Image: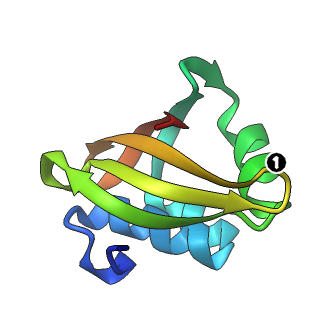
Amino acid sequence: MTIPVEQLSDPAVRAFVVALNANDRAAFQAALAPGATMSDDGSDRDLADWTEREVFSSGGRMEVEAEAEGGRVLVATYVNDTWGAMRTAWRFTVDGGKVSRFETGQA
C-alpha cells in the first residue's frame, strides 16, 4: 500500500517528492536548501550529477510505502528507466523548511 504524496507529514519532504515525481527541475531545486548535500548507499555524491542521472534523465519517481520520524524517514519503491523498481530508504534533514541533506539507499 502506498501513501499518497499529498499526505506526507513533513512539508519540505512532501515538496521534494512532489517535484521529483513530476520531473520538475525548478520545483526540485526550490525544495532544496542552498548547498544541499546527499548520499547514495552510504557514499556522498554530487547532488546535481546524481539527480540528473537518477531522476531527471531517467524518469525517476517514488511510491512511498511508509514514513517515520515525522515524515523525515521514508521507505519507498523507487522506479527509473535505468534500474527499474527497487525498495529504497530515504532520510531527510530539513532546515528552514527546505531539504538540506538526503540519504538514500536500498532498503
Q: Residue furthest front?
A: 1
Say which residue appears at 27% left-offset and 43% top-offset.
Answer: 95
- The colouring scheme, among rainbow, by chain, secondary structure or one colour, is rainbow
Which residue is denoted by mark 1 in the rendering? 53
Q: Residue furthest left?
A: 70
Judge whether 4 appears above or below 16 on screen. Answer: below
Say which residue appears at 42% left-offset and 43% top-offset.
Answer: 90
Between 56 and 81, the one lying in front of the other is: 81
Between 99 and 87, the one lying in front of the other is: 87
Q: Residue 50, percent across and down?
A: 73, 40
Q: Residue 32, percent across and down?
A: 48, 52
User: With 2 as the anchor, is 32 left or right in this view?
Assistant: right
Instruction: Name which quarter of the figure residue 64 lies in.
Output: bottom left
Say which residue appears at 29% left-offset and 58% top-offset.
Answer: 66
Judge whether 60 appears above or below 49 on screen. Answer: below
Q: Residue 35, percent across and down?
A: 52, 35
Judge whether 80 appears above or below 87 on screen. Answer: below
Judge whether 95 appears above or below 37 on screen. Answer: below
Instruction: Name which quarter of the figure residue 39 lies in.
Output: top right
Element type where label 1 sits in the image: helix
Within-10-Å neighbours for mark 1: few <14, some 14–19, many 20+: some
Type of amino acid at the residue the image marks with label 1: Arg
User: With 33 as the anchor, is 106 left or right in this view?
Assistant: right
Between 85 and 17, the one lying in front of the other is: 85
Quarter of the picture holding the N terminus: bottom left
